[in-house]
Amino acid sequence: MVKDFIGNILRPSRFPPLLKVRTSLHYLWLAAVGLPCLWGLGYSTCRVAGMTLLQQQEPRQLTYSTDVGSVVNWPLPQLLKAVPGLKGLVPAESQEELPGILQEVGANVKAFFENFPNTVSVERISMGQRTRDENTAEIHTQKFQYLALAHPLKSGVRLDEYRTDAKGEPVEIGGPGGDYFVTKGFASMSLHFHPAYQADSTFRYLGRQVVNKRQTYVVAFAQRPQVARVVGKIDLPGLPIFVLNQGIAWIDSSTRQILRLRTDLLTSKEDIGPSRETTEIEFQEVQFKESSQVLWLPREVLVTAVWKGRTYLNRHTYSNFKLFTVGIELKVAAPEGTPPDPQNPN
């Protein structure tokens, strides 16, 4: 089944242009600067019952203030109130450790993208809405094969992500009706810490915190509107937009691997799109049976989006990770009229 799944995925005819736009993680490469500008990092699509998404419309770039408030400049009490996951933080006394932390975690992120193999996993998604009484009404639950394909490039690597059924057919998230957000692109979220893109953000060392019995460095970041090249894309009905992010990473103090990552939208000047989209990723160490290679990949992702007074909740879980390669088997028929070989009658 896995071999059939791989063959189906890699067959170009499986991806007509419109379907590929809606199901893959997209990249825009800028030759002028010689570095990749990724749009689709934290890719979201809002589907509203009875409305059609205009895929061909050019995304709109939101405008941001040069001194926009973010997690890198909020006072600590405000930060602790806004991010409950910081409970137990031991605040940093200075920023002296920050350059070393960024250098080492950046080296790990760079290696992750340069050495990323093709992987497949099982993804389960539960989508719901939070009602006014704070209860969650489940809308839809689905299970997919989640394929991440690595494409080596001179300036790094490109990850294309697809959702398919067990037969390798591309599939869409969601049921026949209802309003919901479709979210993806989590394997690439650490790109903010890649050495090639660290200059696009402002960083702040918040301190130390124990996470899952591990000692971590806690680092906040916020993208710089004037220079950011890595942007998210949100497809709203009739209005796709590019967005910038801010966030917090919990980095293992021993391995310098990112254990947990939270991102939020950077506040723009315009009242367009979701008023909130929070993504919380828990990473896990994955040891593949087929190789000695170890990767840190998403284990669980929680996405909370608030749009037009509604709160959308998505929960993604990933398991059963595997590496794969594509093998080709050739069967050559003997010329017509050739007598059968007794030792090989076929």
Image: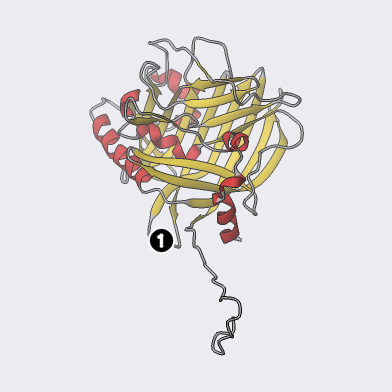
Toward which corner of the image does residue 38 lie, by quadrant? top left
Pointer 1 residue:
291
Residue 226 falls left or right of residue 241: left
Instruction: Answer yes or no: is residue 203 visible.
Output: no
Residue 94 position (above or below residue 157):
above
Instruction: Answer yes or no: is residue 16 visible.
Output: yes
Q: How is the image coloured?
A: secondary structure
Residue 76, image x, y percentages: 39, 20
Q: Disc 1 marks which amino acid?
A: Ser
* Quadrant, the N terminus: bottom right
Residue 256, image x, y percentages: 32, 42
* Quadrant, the C terminus: bottom right
Residue 345, image x, y percentages: 59, 84
Tell me which residue sits at (49%, 62%) in the image. Answer: 327
Residue 15 falls left or right of residue 195: right
Tell me which residue sits at (61%, 39%) in the image. Answer: 16
In this view, the residue farthest toward the front is 337
What crowding class fits label 1: few (fewer than 14 Cα within 10 Å), some (14-19), or many (20 or more)? few
Towards the viewer: 343 or 287 = 343
Residue 244 position (above or below residue 187):
above
Determine whether the residue tagged by mark 1 lies in a helix, strand or loop.
Answer: loop
Toward which corner of the image does residue 292 lie, by quadrant? bottom left
